[in-house]
Amino acid sequence: MRRFAFAALLLFLVSCTPEREQTEDFTVVATFYPIWLAAENITHGVDGVSLKLLTSPHTGCLHDYQLTPGELESIKGADLVLALGEMENFLDRVKQSYPNISINEIGDPDNEHCWVYVRDYIKFVNRIGSAIISADMERSGEYERNIQNYLEELSLLAIELESDMQGLDGVPIIMFHEGFEPWEDAYGLNIVATVESEPGVEPAPREFADLLDLALEKGVKAVFTEPQYSGASAYTVAREIGARIYEIDSVSSGPEDKDFYRKAMRRNAETFRAALGDE
């Protein structure tokens, strides 16, 4: 009787013990907001996965960015670090501090801002997805479902933007920096110049004078800024040539919203239409 009671108790305890779907947790660190955004869509709802953004979501491009001690410490224990590779000057420091952590560089050496144009972003998402799956095969099925769903949404977005951007070619414009150059090839935008060679690097006085001369020669009527960066130089250009200022978003920073990319790109198309469409 005692043996039966003990066996029954053991069976009860075993049946009440929750089964773990995965054997261990998996931690991913993204160095930069666009990487985090893609990884958030890939890992969303997958049990046992922790996704962290290394830098502030309001940082913008990581040119010459230096990690704080706290940010460097937050990498400790990560199973995978996702980085662009070309932009993060601090990667050597990370590799020296954590030689055993896997760092996957998923940027495009030929396109530094490879997330700004939606069809480039689709390739970007695929590279990030492959890196995550390779590092965590145990959850590959869940990642693959998320990737497929996200890519379908992005493919529809690409078609939508191609329709929305029709008829806007030929109008001379000035962009804040070169991140939107793929939009020139894809949609026929006539970008005659950029205000800054890269974010945070304002033009020298001679360069600024040449920019004004070119803008007046080409008849530029619209200058575009970005919310991530100071638009002081762009506002000066617009004032000097009598052009209007418009704001578009390169999604180099943003909120903790996995749908932000699509929202921002739709707003960008609306802004271009307002600036360049028929009055």
Image: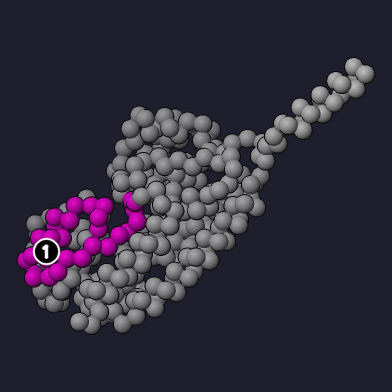
Q: Quadrant of residue 267?
A: bottom left
Q: Work out which quarter of the rendered image holds the N terminus and state it.
A: top right
Q: Of residues 268 and 1, which is closer to you in this image?
A: 1
User: Does the magenta segment cover residue 12?
Assistant: no
Residue 84: image location, x then y, percent: 42, 49
| 86 versus 18 height, above or below | below
In the shown orientation, is residue 16 left or right of residue 77? right
Query: Circle 1 is placed at which residue position?
Result: 237
User: Does the magenta segment cover residue 239?
Assistant: yes
Secondary structure of the residue carrying tag 1 is: helix
In this view, the residue farthest toward the right is 1
Q: Of residues 11 and 219, which is closer to you in this image?
A: 11
| 28 versus 6 height, above or below | below
Q: Amino acid at mark 1?
A: Val
Give the number of marks: 1
Residue 103, visible in the rendered structure: no
In this view, the residue farthest toward the top is 2
In the shown orientation, is residue 155 left or right of residue 8? left
Residue 272: image location, x then y, percent: 27, 72
Q: Quadrant of residue 185?
A: bottom left
In the shown orientation, is residue 206 left or right of residue 77? left
The magenta segment = 226-254
Mark 1: few, some, or many residues within 10 Å (few <14, many ≥20)? many
Q: Residue at x 12, y 66 (%)?
A: 238
